Every structure is written in C-alpha cells, then in structure tokens.
Amino acid sequence: MSEMQLLIGAFHVGPLLLSLALGIYIWRHFKGKPIGQTFSLFMFALSVWVIGTFLRTFTTSPEVYLFLSSVKHIGTGLAPVLFTVFAIYFAGRSDVVTPTLVLGLLVVPALSVIMILTSQTYGLFYQSISTVGLNGETVLQTASGIWYWVHGIYGWTLLAVGSTIIIYTGLQLGTEYRAQASLITAGIMVAWIVNLGYVIFEWPHPTVDPTPIGFAFTGLVIAVGIFSRDLFAVAPVSRSRVVDRIADIILVVDENEQVLDANETAEEILEQETVVGEPVDDVLPSQQQRAGKAIDAEDRDVVTIEGRVFREQEVPVTVDPHADSIVVLTDITEEVRAQEQLAQQNERLDAFASVVSHDLRNPLNVLSGSIELARETGEMKHLERGEKAIERMDEMIEDLLMLAREGQRISGVEPAPLSVVTKQAWGAVETGEASLQVETDRTIKADSSRLQQLFENLFRNAIEHGSADTVVVDTTQDGFYVADDGTGIDAEQKDHLFEMGYSTVSAGTGLGLSIVEAIATGHGWKITVDEGESGGAKFVFSDVELQQSEKQLIEE
C-alpha cells in the first residue's frame, strides 16, 4: 500500500470508527426514543458515506467504482433525509413523521442509486469516468451529470430545512435547548461546508473527498453533547406546546436526580436563574419544608413554595426504575384553603349550636319565668323583664344570622376607601362622647358592606366593652388597624377573644368579634390583637389586597 493510500485511509478510518461507535452507543442508550434512534441511523448513514468514499479510491475498475459510488451515495442520500426527520422529532412534531413522508423523502436518493449504476449507459449521474494521476498513483475521476446536481441540491436543501427547524426550535426554548441546537447545527454544518467545497470547487482535489474529516468534527461535537448535556434525553417542543401551558410545576429528572427539563410554570414559581441542569434537591424546597402541611393523613408529599401549597408526584417515564422520571407539583392552595374554611365553618357550626342551645336558653327561661310571675301576681312589671329578654334574644338571633352570612368566603371585591367606609360605620353605631380619628386615605379591595360591618363591630366593642374615648384607624404596610384608648384586653382574654359567645360583659352577645373574624377570614385577611399606643386594644389586619395605585406608592 502506497504512502498516499495510507494517508487517505487515515483520513477515513478515524471518522468511520467514531461515527459507528456513536451510532451504536446512541441506539443502545436511547432505545425506545425515536429522536435518539433517528440520530443513530443518521450516524450509520454517515458511516456508509465514509465507507463508500474510502473504498472507491482503491479501484481503477469503472464498474467497481460505480458500485462503490452507489454505496457512498446511499449514505449521502439517507443522511439529509434522516437529519430532517431528526429535526422534526427535535421540534416535537412526531405526528408529522409518517411512512408516507419518509418514503417520499427517499424517492430522490433511490433514483440517485439507479442513476449511478446506469451512468455508463445514460450518463445522468456521471457523464464519464477517466483515469488521472495523483502523487504517482492512478485513480478514477468523474465528470458530473445533471442528476449529480439534482442529488446534491436535494441533499443541501434538506440540510437547510433541518438546520432551520433545529435553530428555530432552540430559539423558542430555554438556554439548555439553545445549547443543544447550537451543538447539533455546528457539528453538521462543518461537515457539509467541507462537502460543498469539494463538490463545487473540487477542493482539495477532484478525486479526494475531504468530507469524512468534517464528519470527524461532527462526531466529536455530538459526543460532547451526548456526554455533557444528555443530548437526546427529551424531545423539547413536544413538551413545550403542552407542558408550558400547564399550571402545574413539571420537572423532568434523570436517574442522577438532575433536572433535564422544566416548564415555564416551574421557572416562574421557583424563581431561580437556572432550573435545568441543577440537582432536583437544590431546585425544590428542603425536606423540612416538603414534609409540611398535608391535607389528609395519606398526603405526605406536600411542598410549600412562596406561600402556595403543592402536592408532589413522581411519575416514571418508562417501567425501568433507573430511567428518567417526571416530577409534577400540582397547586392545591385553593383546595387546602377550602378545607381549612370548611373546618372553620364546622367549628363555627358547633359553636353556633352551642350558642343556640345555651345562650338563648337563658333569656327564654327569663321570659318564661316573667310570664309565670305576671300570671300569678297580675303585676305587669314582670312582663317588662320578659320584654327585655325578648330584645336580648332578637339581638342574639340577628347576630347569629349575620355571623352565618359573614362566614362565607367573599366572592367579589371592589375599591373601598377606608376613610369613607369607617365614617359610615361610625355613624351607624351609638358612640356617645367618643371620637373617631381616621389617619389614612388608603383604598383597599373589599366587599364594602361587609367591611362596614367589620368596623361597626370593632367600634361597638371599643366603646361598649373597652370604654374608649378615642378610636383610631390607620394603615400598615400590608393592611390597616383599629386602635382605641380604652381599658384594653387582658392576656387571658386574648386566647378566647374570637370564640363565639365569649363576652367580658353580661349584656353582650359574645358574637361581635366572631363576626369581625369571619369577615376578615372571608376576605383572606389575617387578624392579630396587640396593645395600642394609648394602652387600649389594637386590632391589626394584614394580607389585605390593596388598590393597584396604592401598591405602587408603597413599593416606591
């Protein structure tokens, strides 16, 4: 074997072994994944291309040369077809890949093989075959026919289509897929640019096809992509079109617990610069947080993120326990809130029954005794006591009905200026000599009528139970408060303050502050009780929804 033949062999054997090795590895490692197996077939097609190119340089027989050229061009014909199919899979349009499409794309390559084998008769692919000298060796050289250019233009067109699909897909997705698209496109383009130089400009020599050297670069780039980025683990847009529109957090996790893919919801809620490529334990909350708040005894996989509650499920992609899996976090915040509200309503119902059975029984007994005494003595003064008992029952029934209504979740809110609503509430309460100071002009989102009822009960509580002279309404960072300068609330009373039927005075129904709590809960607000600056009680409401303009002012 001459020195030139050894050099040509070196140029071909390396790319051949690399493409074969990659093809076998991808086929075995990504078994059952069309995107990986299609690319594996593409690498095998490149191997056929290299084999045909390599072997035909060692023959001077036109018949053998044409046969080996047909082998070569089976590879050159299959490679762009398979690359285009791979690009379609990469874009998530597996529905487009049909037998009809694939057979249609193979028509030109099949005709090319026929044209090559019949070149000596018709001259459509090769017009002629002649011998030339190359560094002292005799080799065959061809003159291109019309179908040669049809074959070439067809392959380059498919390459352009496939590359465009991959680049466009990468731009539509996250940085991880852009990196994938860049690797694939760069690797393929180098080989095809080298091929264009050979076909159009006969570089470096009409009888020496340098395309295999370009394929060597292609194989190296793709090898880097496979081993560093798990290149074919997921077909991107297939999940993009569906998964990105799902409100759940969806993470694709490999066997090493590393995130391969994440939908837009995950990126928005998790609020991390990079989700893809990170260990799943770094992306999701810690085990202490994840053990958190279960809504039933069997629900242990609950995650709390930014105040929202998610149920975590892990779904295997295949039956193989070591294969990739999908972690799905479903937002169950509303479900948890509904169950909490149901629990509160049940507690309220129990307390309601207790008030009806116990607290109403007392004025009923008074009324019954008053009527009996009036009947026995004939004195009407006993009926006056009974009349007061009736008024007491009427007041309790009215409060109970109001409490039942306020216990329901607020469904519609509107802009409610605190200064306006508080003054309306103040005017509806017997305030005596007490005064109201409204030190805010903030507007919140609330049910105005229920908000007024909340203030009426707080004002009535401050004046009737706390003997307040001044009541102040002002705002906090995320809400408002009502404070008074009355007698305040003992530490022992705080624990029972919002219990239904609890009152510090005998004349009270014990329902006023329960109504306040029910209205706040219905709006989704939190309520706390502190000691005011003047020594009285201070009721603070937080998590209050503000008017948009108010939010902007606070943020500024």
Image (spheres, rainbow, N blue to C red):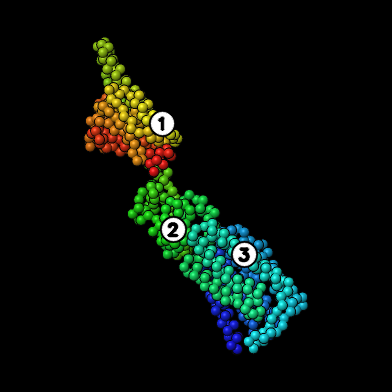
Nearer the N terminus, badge 2 or badge 3?
3
Which label is found at residue 160? 3
Quarter of the rendering containing residue 61: bottom right
Query: Can residue 332 be seen at all in this image of the molecule?
Result: yes
Percent x, y of residue 69: 67, 78
Q: What element carries label 1?
A: helix
**Direction from residue 99 to residue 454 in the image, left or right:** left
- Nearer the camera: disc 1 or disc 3: 3
**Circle 3 crowding by C-alpha within 10 Å: few under 14, some 14–19, many from 20:** some
Q: Name the residue under label 2.
A: 275
Q: Are marks 1 and 3 in contact (CB under 8 Å)?
A: no
**Amino acid at the residue labelled 2:** Val
Is 86 located above or below residue 421 in the figure?
below
Is 260 located above or below residue 394 in the figure?
below
Which label is found at residue 448? 1
Rounded to the nearest angstrom, the CA distance separating label 1 from label 3 is 63 Å
